[in-house]
Image (cartoon, grey):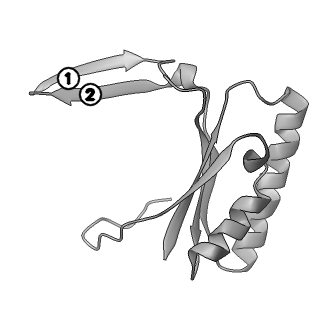
């Protein structure tokens, strides 16, 4: 089954040098997952100031440039993994540096067979 680990954290919780170390550690986790055939994709996200929000209500669209987060934590990045159980994904999330300064949320993906194959 495929799972996504969403990393939620507050912006600015990492000093630049700490953030670079966390990225390096995350890359190592990805290599370890790849060696086990579990790695699908992962990436940190750009700051919320780069976000664009799109809403469509009653056929009318609204486009708003960020930042617009109304919470203390934003989605800062993700890991997309293949695993036999949620317990195995919990162990991956525990190794994520993002979980030390924020929250790692694990959610199974819905498998839709009618989707095109990923191009990446």
Give neighbour class at mark 2: few <14, some 14-19, many 20+ (Cα, 10 Å): few
In the shown orientation, is residue 58 left or right of residue 106?
Answer: left
Is residue 28 shown above or below 61? below
Mark 2–mark 1 contact, CB under 8 Å?
A: yes
Eyeballing the image, is 50 above or below 115?
above
In the picture, measured across the screen, residue 6 lies left or right of residue 10, that is: left
Residue sitting at x 72%, y 69%? 91
Between 16 and 95, the one nearer to me in the picture = 95
Q: Is residue 87 above or below residue 11?
A: below
Q: Nearer the viewer, residue 93 or 65?
A: 93
Say the numbered circle drawn on residue 61. Answer: 1
Q: Position of residue 73 (x, y in %)?
A: 60, 32
Percent from the top left, x then y, of residue 20? 84, 38
Q: Residue at x 65, y 79 (%)?
A: 37
Distance from disc 2 to disc 1, alpha carbons, whole Å, reads: 6 Å
Q: Position of residue 38 (x, y in %)?
A: 63, 75
Quarter of the figure with residue 118 = bottom left
* Residue with the mark numbered 2: 55
């Amino acid at each position: 089954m495929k799972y996504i680990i969403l990393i939620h954290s507050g912006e600015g919780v990492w000093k630049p040098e700490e953030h670079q170390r966390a990225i390096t550690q995350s890359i190592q986790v990805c290599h370890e997952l790849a060696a086990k055939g579990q790695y699908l994709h992962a990436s940190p996200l750009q700051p919320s100031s780069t976000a664009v929000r799109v809403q469509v209500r009653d056929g009318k669209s609204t486009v708003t440039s960020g930042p617009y987060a109304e919470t203390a934590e934003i989605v800062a990045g993700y890991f997309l993994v293949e695993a036999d159980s949620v317990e195995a994904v919990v162990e991956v999330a525990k190794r994520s540096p993002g979980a030390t300064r924020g929250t790692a949320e694990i959610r199974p993906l819905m498998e839709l067979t009618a989707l095109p194959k990923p191009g990446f």
